[in-house]
Each structure stands twice: as C-alpha cells, then as structure tokens.
Amino acid sequence: MWEVYVKYKTPGVTKMFEISFFAAELTFTMIWLLLRGIVWMDKRRVDWKREIGLLLMYVNLFIIIRYVFFARDLVDGHVQPLVFDSAAAFPLRVNLVPLVHLFDYDNVRDIIWNIAGNSVMFIPSGIILPILYKKLNNIWKVTAVAAIISLCIEIIQLPFASRASDIDDIILNTLGAAMGYGIYAAGKFVISFLGTAQSERDAVIIRTSTIGILTNVLLAAFKAVVGILSHSIAVILDAVNNLSDALSSIITIGGTKLASKLPDKKHPLGHGRIEYLSAMIVSGIVLYAGITSAFESLKKIIHPEKPDYSIVSLFIIVVAVVVKIVLGRYVRAKGEKVNSGSLIASGSDAMFDAILSASVLACAIFFMITGISLEAYVGAAISAFIIKSGIDMMTETLNEILGVRADKETVNKIRKILTSEPDVRGAYDLIMHNYGPGKNYASAHIELPENMTVREVDRLTRRLESQVYRETGVIVTGIGLYSYNTGNDEAARIQNDVRETVLAHDWAIQFHGFYLDMEAKEMTFDVVMSFDIQACDGVKILYEELQEAYPEYKIVIAPDVDISVTE
C-alpha cells in the first residue's frame, strides 16, 4: 500500500515516501475502470472492439510503468517500492546529450537490456495508437505521440531516488513506436492485398480474422515483454501460443481468399472446398495445443515445481482471459453467422485459451491462499477437454469433405417448392452436392402426368429451378421426370397393391415413380432402401413377390439410396 516514512536527520528533516507497485497499479486500474464506466453510461452502449484496443493500450502502459519506475530485480519475490527522498531529489539526474551514455554499462547484457527493453516496450503502442485513433494515420504522428508520452514519463521520474531522466530513453521509446507502426502498416498492406473479398461473407471472414491477428499479436508482444523482463518461461510460452492463434487467423484469411477464386477450366465448380482444408488445419492447431499442454502438465505432475506468481504475471493472465473470452465469443458468433468452419474453430480455440488461462489464475489464487499447487492436474484435465474438442472439430470438417446427409430443413423446403406446382404429384431422389460453405448444387425427380407436352415440362422445370435458387440459394442442376398414369382405374389399383407389397418391408423406406404400360405389359418403379439391406438383395425379394402376383408383366425395379429421405 501507500507507505509513508518520515526520517529525522541533522540538521533538518528528510521526508521519504515509498510507493508500492501493487498500490500504484491498483489505484490506476480503479481510475481507468471508473473512467470507462462513465463513458459506457454516457453512450449507453459498449464498442467491444474499441474497448479491447483500449484495454491492450492500458496493459502496455501498465508494463511501461512497472519496468520504468520500479526496479527490475525482485527482492524476496516482490517488486521493490518506488522511493521519493527529499534529500536525494536534488541535484536532478538528467542526461540531455543523445547517445553519449548509451553504452555506459558494466556488461553487454545490460547494454542489450537497455536498448532492447526501451524499444520493445513501445512497439505495442505503435500498433495500437493508429487502430484506436484514425487521425494518427502516418508514422510521424504516431512517433510524435509516443515521444510526448515518453517525455512525460522521463519528467515524472525526476524527483524519485534511483531514477534518472535520459534523452536516450526517449529516442529508444520513439524508435520502438516507429517499429510498431511499421508492423501495423505492413499488416494493413498484407491484409488489404489478401482481403479483396468476392462477397460480403468473405469480407466478414477476413475482417474478423484480421481482428484476431492484431489482438493475438499484441497479446503475444505484451506477454513476451513481461516474460523476458521477469524471466518467466511460462509467460513466454503463452506468448508463443498467441502467435499460433494469430497463425490460425492468417490461415483462415488465406483459405477464404483461395476459396473465393472464380471457377476455371480445371475447377468449373469453384474452389470453395479449400475452406474445409483451412478449417482442418486450424483444428489441427487446436489438437496440437491440447497435446502439448497435456505433455507439459504430465511433466509437472511427475516432476513438480513450486510455482512463483508475481502481480504482473497475474495481471497479464487476467487481461488475457478477458480479451480471449471477448475475442472467442465474437469470432465464433461471426463464424456461425456466415457458416465458416475456420472462424468457428478459431473462436473455439480462443475460448479454450481463456479457459486454460483462467484455470492457471484460479490455481495461482488457490496456491497463494493454501500453499497447494493444483496447476498441473487442472492443466491435464483441461488438455483432455481441448484434445477432445480438437478431434470433434476435425471430424466435423472431415465429414464435410467426405460428404454428409443434406440438412433436413433445407431438403423439406426444396421439396415443398418442387411440389408447389399443381401438376407435380411428388418430388423424390433429391441429391445435394456441397462445394464449399454456401455453395450447394442439387438434382431431383418430380412426378408429372403422362399427357404433359415437352414444352410444358420445360417451362415448369425452369420455373422451379429459379424459385429454389431464390428461396434457398441452392442451384438445381437438373430435374428428372417420372410420369404417372392418368384416367386409368386399373393402373391405380395395381399401383396401390404394389405400394402395399413394397412398403410391407421395414427396409423399404419410400415407393415412387410408378408407371404401368398396359400395352407393353411393363411395370416400372423406384424404391428407396435403408442401409440395413444390400440393394441387390432387396430387389431380388421384391421381384420374386411381384412376379408371382403379376406374371404377365415385365417388372423393372430401380433401387435408390437413402440420401435425403430419413433423418
């Protein structure tokens, strides 16, 4: 907490203030939450994408405050307090000559630490600022803002003991912000190059994936800085995991871009199925993350280590959990809205990361209270859940590639449209082929009266094909015909008898396409059989029964597969 000590020295009085890191950050965090709450109440709505950006900017400032104002090394596992000593405040410790003292350190490690640390800390600012504020649309404006922030930090440091203000820090901070803007500009260029969407659906996928890439890169940068500065391998590995999530989003964008290519001579039905391949790769990444997490957890169970949690690492975990939950829900919702398996898998992956990080946070709090570490065991349980989810996502995508039964709702809707015409007695043999999300082709048979002309049939089928596409988005590539007898009572009687004979068998699901040519003595019909019987066996049974009942007729039975009849 805020700790104030007053020391008496001869001949005067020296005042010393010690400000703990926890108290400082808690105060700033409460102020930040209060200000954001006021903004939310004033606008009566929350722009979650902007709030994520502001939260990441705050985390960046959190890290800067930690390693600029407070000593890098821990004492007994705690951050050393910031000390104000009136006796040591003057003369001010200021360096205004650029680059002269840049290498005035005892060893190379400290030189690298000074240069890299001061630069890397401001890289996230260079990425976030132009995203949050559209007016900061070039490198000069971004670096100017970063230089002002750095200058304010250097001025605030002046009265504190063991702190010094250095023009080199401002230069390095500004350089880091310039590097961050370079990353932002390069990413914007690449995304613009890849993101020429062929449809609104593609635009949604690319835009959502872009948000995922930027969020994960920023999280990775924050965690990498904290991991390097705090010597925490766990935080560094978590940063690598965020980079793998960014890779998932890049794969999603690439898959969408390739899938949206126009049809060509070699692929006349388009390239839509590439999206399934990208979803398969993302599912593989989820599965790999689960397997590696399981191995790490098992190693910790076999060779347990006493965890060492710092306030900074716990704060980073909290922020990561919040950001990942929001990102995961957002990406998954967008994926379900536009039927993108890759986005759904990426959103699920983000939620798994949030669950994993939340479990680490819960275990850390439990350990700090009881001294008992459950991290490895909880990690193993969650890893099993992630592995199962990865397998489920991969299986679902593989089923789409292999081909699955058409959606019952869509099938019924198409049948209803096909049978909406007065002359159509039934619609059968509906077969749907999928060539990527939202790219469905279908064919079907309809029963029409035997006395319709070819011209009438042509007009009817064209009208039905157009109506199906307008109402369902499914392209009907062909409509086959069954004719039925009209004005013949004998044919109707025989048809009813044959239907009863056929459907008396449990494996006979549907009977249709019946036509009786009484002059040629020929009977034809189709029967849909379940997967419980071989088609040849079913035909043989029906043929023997019907040939015995109607020996004077030539019987032709066409067996159909249960593609879209049953659930």
Image (cartoon, grey):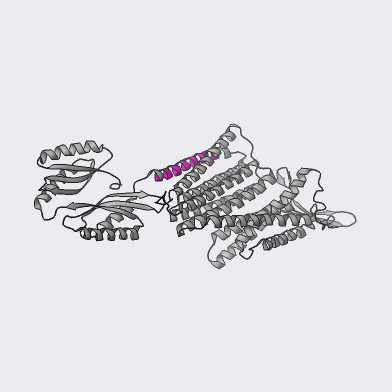
Q: Which residues are magenta?
A: 377-400
Q: Quadrant of residue 49?
A: bottom right
Q: What type of secondary structure mainly makes up the magenta span?
A: helix
Residue 71 seen? no
The image shows residue 341 at horizontal and vertical percentages of 45, 49
Is 271 left or right of 190, judged from the image as shown?
A: left
Q: Is residue 377 above or below residue 495?
A: above
Q: Closest to the observer: 198 or 225?
A: 198
Residue 415 in magenta?
no
The image shows residue 441 at horizontal and vertical percentages of 35, 52
Residue at 65% in and 57% down: 181
Residue at 46% in and 58% down: 198
Residue 391 in magenta?
yes
Is 370 left or right of 99, judged from the image as shown?
A: left
Q: Quadrant of residue 230?
A: top right
Furthest residue toward bottom = 42
The image shows residue 45 at horizontal and vertical percentages of 53, 64
Q: Closest to the observer: 159 or 192?
A: 192
The image shows residue 528 at horizontal and vertical percentages of 24, 44
